[in-house]
Image (tube, rainbow, N blue to C red):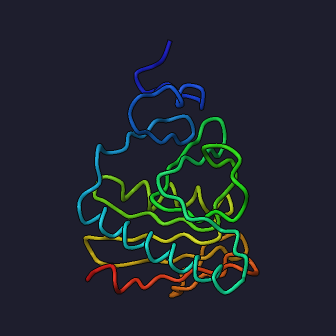
Amino acid sequence: MLSKFEFPRYTYNDYKNWKEDWEMIDGYPLQLLPSASFKHSKIQSKLIFQGLSSLSSLNSFGKNCICELCNELDWIINDQTVVRPDIMIVCQEVKENFLTFPPTLVIEILSPSNIKTDRVIKFELYQENGVQFYIMVDPNKETVEVFELINNAYQQTENNTFQLTKTCQVSFDFEQLWK
């Protein structure tokens, strides 16, 4: 029997049967809000457009960039941890309808309901799992924080161009997000 301070923990088998939108960290469910705010959605659209334009321009110059931009895709880290970043760039072949390996770059757009999750829990999770670049966008403060994994720890940088692989890079114009 559970004490009043213990909560049940779940696995991916439970997660895949849930009807609403969820993430799961260490077996504990986190429900996603029904819909992002207009400002969140607008910023996400701008970032997706910039990222796709940047990646496709590399291909048009014959660089054979293998990286793909994804949004709202599950990343199954292990049987008890599944996250769904706002935007990811993946530089390996995706063989399922979800990721089973770390993306190269993750962008999370903060909202009042997820600040602690994105700033603390996912920050540590992404760092521990080898996500090379982690970008947090705060629509309310109109700020962007960029972190690069250096010696297994995130270091804050001022970059807006990211070398994803030898032949792939992506650039964002963060100032355009607020216009």
> What quarter of the picture does the C terminus occupy?
bottom left
Residue nearest the viewer, comparing 61 with 41: 61
- Residue 89 screen position, x and y as percent: 59, 65
Please state the total of marks drawn on the protein image: 0
- Residue 147 screen position, x and y as percent: 55, 75
Indicate the quadrant where residue 174 lies.
bottom left
* In this view, 3 is above or below 126: above
* In this view, 88 is above or below 148: above
Q: Residue furthest top?
A: 1
Residue at position x 25%, y 66% in the image: 39
Residue nearest the viewer, comparing 9 with 67: 67
Residue nearest the viewer, comparing 32 with 126: 32
- Residue 87 screen position, x and y as percent: 49, 62
Indicate the quadrant where residue 14 lies.
top right
Residue at position x 65%, y 79% in the image: 59
Residue at position x 66%, y 68% in the image: 67
- Residue 132 screen position, x and y as percent: 65, 70
**Left or right: where does residue 55 sit relative to residue 130?**
left
Residue at position x 59%, y 32% in the image: 12
